[in-house]
Amino acid sequence: MSETAELNVGGKTYTLPVIEGTEQERAIDISKLRAESGHVTLDDGYGNTGSCKSNITFIDGEKGILRYRGYSIEELAVRSTFVEVAHLLIWGELPTSAELQRFSNMLTENSMIHEDMKFHFEGFPRRAHPMAILSSMINATSCFYPELLDSNYDTDSLARQAANLLSQVRTIAAFAYRKSRGLPIIYPKLEYKYTANFLHMMFSHPYRDFPLDPEAVRALDLIFLLHADHEQNCSTATVRMVASSKANLFASAAAGVCALWGPLHGGANQAVLEMLEAIHREGDDGSRFIAAAKDKNSGKKLMGFGHRVYKHYDPRAKIIKQACDEVLARLNKSDPLLDIAKKLEEAAMKEDYFVERNLYPNVDFYSGIIMRALGIPVEMFTVIFAIGRMPGWIANFKEVAEDAKGRIYRPRQIYTGKTLRSYVPIKERGQAGS
Ligand code: SDX
């Protein structure tokens, strides 16, 4: 006999099913609540609302657990690669060597964007933010590859769409960067794998390839891997929302890019670097900024801190913080901002304000230090996040698209506006009582 919950409202008692996931998470299923009771629930920011069941990623915010398809982020970070994790997230299993080779070949075959897409880059102003270019060009991709709008999503069709999007998001990002610097675009090379090809397209000279330091390639691959998926975050929930209307993968991913751009979400990695640079420039030892971040009237937040789900250290932040020291040492670089970030974390962790609110470093707090060490400009940080998150968005899109009983996402609301009133002709408006 499955467990139930009882709701007493309006003098009546309603019995609601309780469901439990494979990790013993529990939810009260309110699918029939309105039909039976005339009530909906209200949950600002959806902090208490599950929008779906999903088999892709599991997070335990209290214990700082993150698993992709059951594999811990700690183990994947050390033993796997971004492309292998992309396969795991999209198709649910770590690939065999034959499957990995096939997927890698598909990514290589799709690394060039349609030549006519270049004209769009000509039209963007130099100072256009690359996230605006990225969302525009992902959506534009479907104009050049109408065959990828096939909505039957059989195995081959979705594999082609996934490979095209995952490979071309990297090329679009690199082209956007080159255009923003007034540099000639650099085409992908067939002999380079995913992450190496991105660095090549970003930093090579038309007549001399960028020297690809294996440490730099590995560091960026780790950043992509750590960002690959994260349950129903704002941008992934947006991708599912758009996918639920049966819109295509490119439209859904373009919407995800727009949601990710916000400084409360993926845009935080750019905001963290700008915060650290300001603290460094102003000679602040961090204490002035922390005082401002605690002051509600300051309009400042300690960017890269806090999380809706993690009420402890974000496991990704722990991995990235450790990687910062290793990458800087291996690249023989130092960065005063890393020392500032560490001091900021240490100081914040002594402040009741942060401890009482369970505000710890999240994935964005240290990631920019590594990206800076790789020569990636700050305005490209959230683009790097979007490239990394693409497999998660594709996997969630696929989960929605393959759900034959799936319904369009259409939340309800509680109306708090004006009640019924009659039209007032313009000549009578502005008079008392109208
Ligand atoms: C990502 O959801 C995901 O999984 C996202 C992500 C992913 O991989 O997809 O993990 C990636 O987006 C990480 C988060 C990046 N954003 C930032 O670093 C921006 C700074 N952080 C905050 O804006 C905030 O912590 C959020 C947005 C991350 C979470 O916001 P919540 O859950 O809505 O929490 P809240 O704003 O209600 O904060 C609770 C309290 C408030 O104070 P009180 O009203 O209790 O007095 O904590 C305070 C907040 O003012 N607070 C902060 C703070 N974060 C929360 N105060 C100062 N600095 C901060 N960073």
Image (cartoon, rainbow, N blue to C red):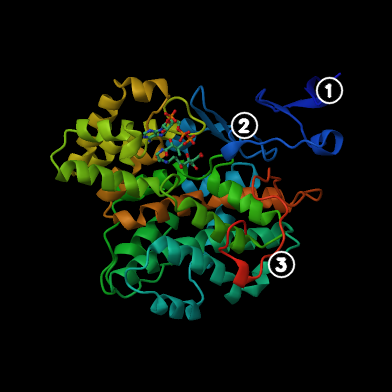
Out of 408 and 219, give the one closest to the viewer.
408
Q: Which residue is mark 2?
A: 48
Q: How many marks?
A: 3
Quadrant into which the N terminus falls: top right
- The answer to whether the residue labelled 1 contacts the one labelled 3, judged by CB atoms less than 8 Å apart, is no
Q: Amino acid at mark 2?
A: Asn
Q: Which residue is mark 3?
A: 150
Classify the position of ligand 1 by quadrant: top left, top right, bottom left or bottom right: top left
Residue at 49 percent across and 77 percent down: it is 117
Q: Amino acid at mark 3?
A: Asp
Q: Name above or below for residue 271 compared with residue 245.
A: above
Residue at 44 percent across and 57 percent down: it is 193
N-terminal label among 1 and 3: 1
Task: Inspect this view and state whether residue 379 appears.
Answer: yes
Q: Determine crowd level at label 3: few under 14, some 14-19, many 20+ residues with C-alpha closer than 10 A.
A: few
- The answer to whether the residue labelled 2 contacts the one labelled 3, judged by CB atoms less than 8 Å apart, is no
N-terminal label among 1 and 2: 1
Out of 43 and 135, give the one closest to the viewer.
43
Q: Secondary structure at mark 2?
A: loop
Q: Secondary structure at mark 3?
A: loop
Q: Which residue is mark 1?
A: 11
From the viewer's perspective, is 109 left or right of 347?
Answer: right
